[in-house]
Image: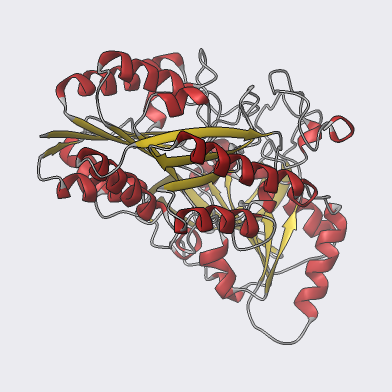
Amino acid sequence: MKIAVGMFKHETNTFSPVRTAWEDFGPGGPLFGDEAYKTFRHSGYSMAGLLEQAELLGGDVSIPIAARALPSAPVSRDAFERISDTLCEAALRCDVMMLDLHGAMVAEHYDDGEGEMLRRIRAAAPNLPLALALDSHANITPRIARNCTVMVGYRTYPHLDMVETGRMAGRLLRETLAGKLKPVTVVRRCPILANMLRMVTSEQPMAQVIEAAAAAERDGMPCVTVFTGFPLSDTADTGLTVVATADGDIARAEEVAQKIVDLAWSLREQFNSDFEPLGDALKRAKALTAQSGSEGPVLLADISDNCHSGGTQDSMDVIEKALDQGLTGILAGPIVDPEAVAKMVEAGVGATVTLAVGGKSAIPALRTPLRPMRLTGVVKHIAEGRFTVEGPVFTGMKVNLGRTVVLDTGPLVLVVSEDRVEALDPQQFRLFGLEPTRFRYVVLKSKVQYRPSFLPLAKGAIDCNGAGVASMDLAAFDWKKLARPIFPLDRSNT
């Protein structure tokens, strides 16, 4: 038996200006064969679980391509076609295929990126058994479900079960091949554009919806996944969906999916969130720092400039307003600014520099453009920003920030880099001799994924809704393709 295991992962922010070309899908482009195997077999990705299950089948396992890019603008036509062609060619040469996908990919020429790619694979190999492991932020379309055998999504956010998701998808496919399972899948959409901060699975309302899906599985359903969707993608399919897979009983799958959709709809107000003014959030952070009790910094989560939501990671809004309020002992970054990095590298370690940092990305989707912040400080450290994530989220992810500089302004120690990374691991600071626990405040470019690694080090965390293209203020964007009405944008009509 020949088994192909591949990866094509991209979460598309259609408002983001950050490009998504072939070379962005890995260190200079996608990985192949043995190199991909060594990178992902024992990683924290779903692909590790898929590979494990593929090997249990006892056949010849190969990786035709492993492509993963940080969330950003729609995938270029060239990259989409090259990666899709590679997977279609592999489908012609294998007996079984397993794919690690995201589910919210938009290409320059196809809004339903995964659906189009899977349609092509199915056209090339109509009877190919095909398993999908998907992100829970997928915007699931009927085309995705029609063109696979089984599909499973994460059940946690922060994403702590990616490997287990791959294992489950692979196991269901193995059961199908053995004749133990006849999967039939139903997709039901719920017209909710959920706030990502309300998608945390250990908190309400998601905990209740996730439990309903788990209860259905305990009652005999092979797989039920609640896909909250990625709300920063302007497509007709964006939003919450429930995908239920039954063993040959389509009526049962329809019943379960609709029941959970009805539950989610009944909780719709809880999927929305009012935003605290940034100034008030920073006042709360200042008060929290003054409180006695647990040690450690207060984390300022810059939720609107999170690169794992397509953010440019160069907004200085939260940092500037924190300094304006008199906060000191701040550690922040990385801020992506290759121009500032080049100037500081030229100046050298120990040099005092005055320069504009951040705020240089042109973001047409924002009504008010970002702006740089003029800073004076001492260049403390210059290094290549390379490390491997060790934390429980995206374990094994290789990070390359490019040239990275530490600038000390006194009240602020700022990490400035040539490339992006979400705050997944304290190594992003420790690599440069910066210990986060020694600061009063740490500004992190992240919404939720930082929590498992950083919260244990901290006194507390405050969400800061500053300027950025990853903002959860969904009413601030100009929607053109989104299916309407949808909650909460059309509260009075839903």
Which of 318/380 is in front? 318
* Residue 136 at x, y percent in the picture: 52, 44
* Residue 222 at x, y percent in the picture: 40, 48
The residue furthest bottom is 293
So how many labels did they put on this image?
0
Left or right, 438 with reference to 135: right
Residue at image point 52% right, 71% down: 435
The C terminus lies in which quarter of the figure?
A: top right
Which of 155/368 is in front? 155
* Residue 408 at x, y percent in the picture: 62, 60
Left or right, 259 with reference to 31: right
Q: Is residue 482 above or below residue 200?
A: above
Q: Is residue 232 above or below residue 392?
A: above
In which quarter of the view is residue 69 placed? Answer: top left
The residue furthest right is 492
In which quarter of the view is residue 89 placed? Answer: top left
Residue at image point 75% right, 87% down: 292
* Residue 453 at x, y percent in the picture: 51, 66
Left or right, 166 with reference to 239: left
Residue at image point 43% right, 56% down: 161
Left or right, 4 with reference to 376: left
Inspect this view and state whether residue 187 appears: yes
Inspect this view and state whether residue 82 appears: no
The N terminus lies in which quarter of the figure?
A: top left
Which of 395/378 is in front? 395
Residue at image point 22% right, 51% down: 52
Colour scheme in use: secondary structure
Q: Is residue 398 above or below residue 65?
A: below
